[in-house]
Image (cartoon, grey):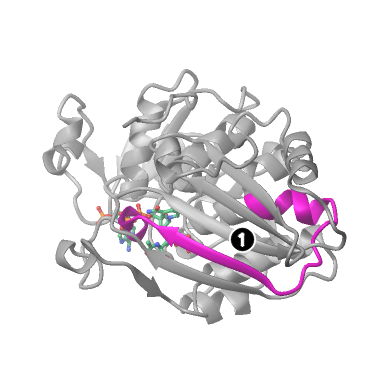
Amino acid sequence: MKVSIVGATGYGGLELIRLLKNHPHFEIASLHTSSKFGRQIHEDNPHLRHLEYALEEIDPEKISKKSEIVFLATPSGVSAKLARAFYQLGVKIIDLSGDLRLKNPEEYEEWYKHSAAPVEVLDEAVYGLSEWNAKHIKQAKIVANPGCYPTATLLGLAPLYTEQWAEGKDVIVDAKSGVSGAGKSPSAGTHYSEINENLKIYKVHQHQHIPEIEQQLANWLQDSGPISFSTHLVPMTRGIMSTMYVKLRKRTTTKELLDLYKTVYEGHPFVRIQPQDAFPCTKQVYGSNFCDIGVAFDERTNKATIVSVIDNLMKGAAGQAVQNANILLGAEETAGLLNIPLYP
Ligand SMILES: NC(=O)C1=CN([C@@H]2O[C@H](COP(=O)(O)OP(=O)(O)OC[C@H]3O[C@@H](n4cnc5c(N)ncnc54)[C@H](OP(=O)(O)O)[C@@H]3O)[C@@H](O)[C@H]2O)C=CC1
Ligand SMILES: CC(=O)N[C@@H](CCC(=O)OP(=O)(O)O)C(=O)O
């Protein structure tokens, strides 16, 4: 099946090229940019020196003649404007941005400070947390690919929420990300001398992923409350670690928690549950689509500590987008994605 990538020159778009170029079922029909048309993709990306793709303008009508699926790897605010045109032309959309994830347009405008997508587009969009929504993704015309922090956090919390073990109140999520999460354009806050040998907290109580996580938690557990969510920049390129502290409805043991997680994620090859007392680190998922989860029960506080790691550009963005495209196609969800993480 032929696919196109809009935003091909950014980190998410480049990761999509890496995955789709060797994919058994998809063929890249075209790459699109808002500012570099006419240039070859390899001109600014020497790691793609062997590929010949001219960057093209973003013209939904032309794209609809070449491709059945379009990946939108553009900054927030862009797909809110572009999605309707693709939808009306019958091109399936997988949107990597936050524009189509929140069902309430006012909530989107409050957190993202952009105009929301048309309601008909938001109503059509299916939240693309692959492990939890495959049934709906399969039928979708528009997939709202989850954010990087929400992917790590929701995969970590899901067993406790869906099985009603969590109290659903006073949950703390302490998350850290590598700098590629901020995209390819350099900024004052992310350039080398600001990040190297530094650890920064940012967007305290204001992170746009808070409503996305809470929206999904409320789908799983009726009386779930607001979460405390903090995000940090770590001096590394890729990786997210989300550490969660969750009060439970009943006393349990680490062994019982592990059994729950193993049972819930049985048959989901991208979620790997750690053995007892072994917590995951970001390097063990680097460059891969895995989400590795470690759990422990704290008898002193009656809380579960959950640690979930992903590669933000893979399971947190392009990897999950390709997983969703596989599901849309009706192919095996692992197609083109079972590479072993880069190590060391
Ligand atoms: N980086 C990450 O880890 C993750 C990113 N995301 C989301 O995915 C999306 C892409 O992220 P990322 O690749 O990191 O971002 P980048 O900043 O690296 O890339 C953004 C891309 O969009 C293009 N673009 C910029 N402005 C416009 C515009 N007005 N219209 C159309 N295209 C435009 C850019 O280049 P050009 O000028 O060539 O058009 C570039 O190709 C974002 O919404 C991001 O929030 C989601 C999960 C994780
Ligand atoms: C490290 C870093 O800056 N990460 C970004 C992730 C952005 C992102 O993925 O945004 P949407 O999913 O909402 O589109 C951030 O924290 O804002």
Q: Find residue 116 and report its horizontal and vertical position in percent.
A: 54, 72
Give whichever of 77, 230 is nearer the camera.
Answer: 230
**Amino acid type for the residue under numbered disc 1:** Met
Q: Find residue 19 and report its horizontal and vertical position in percent.
A: 40, 30
Direction from residue 136 to residue 12 in the image, left or right: left
- Write down the region rendered in magenta: 156-182
The answer to which quarter of the image holds residue 182 is bottom left
Residue 58 within the magenta-colored segment of the rendering: no
Q: How many marks?
A: 1
- Residue at the far top: name it: 24
Residue 157 within the magenta-colored segment of the rendering: yes
User: Which residue is pictured at 83% across the width and 52% down the height?
Assistant: 252
User: Which residue is pictured at 61% across the width and 79% down the height?
Assistant: 106
Direction from residue 57 to residue 271 in the image, left or right: right
Q: Is residue 89 above or below residue 191?
A: above
Q: Is residue 145 above or below residue 267?
A: below
Residue on which disc 1 sits: 244
Q: Residues within 10 Å of mark 1 (few under 14, many from 20)?
A: many
Element on which disc 1 rests: strand
Judge whether residue 77 can be spotted in this image. Answer: no
Quadrant location, the C terminus: top left
User: Which residue is pictured at 78% across the width and 60% down the height?
Assistant: 219
Give whichever of 53, 91 is nearer the camera.
Answer: 53
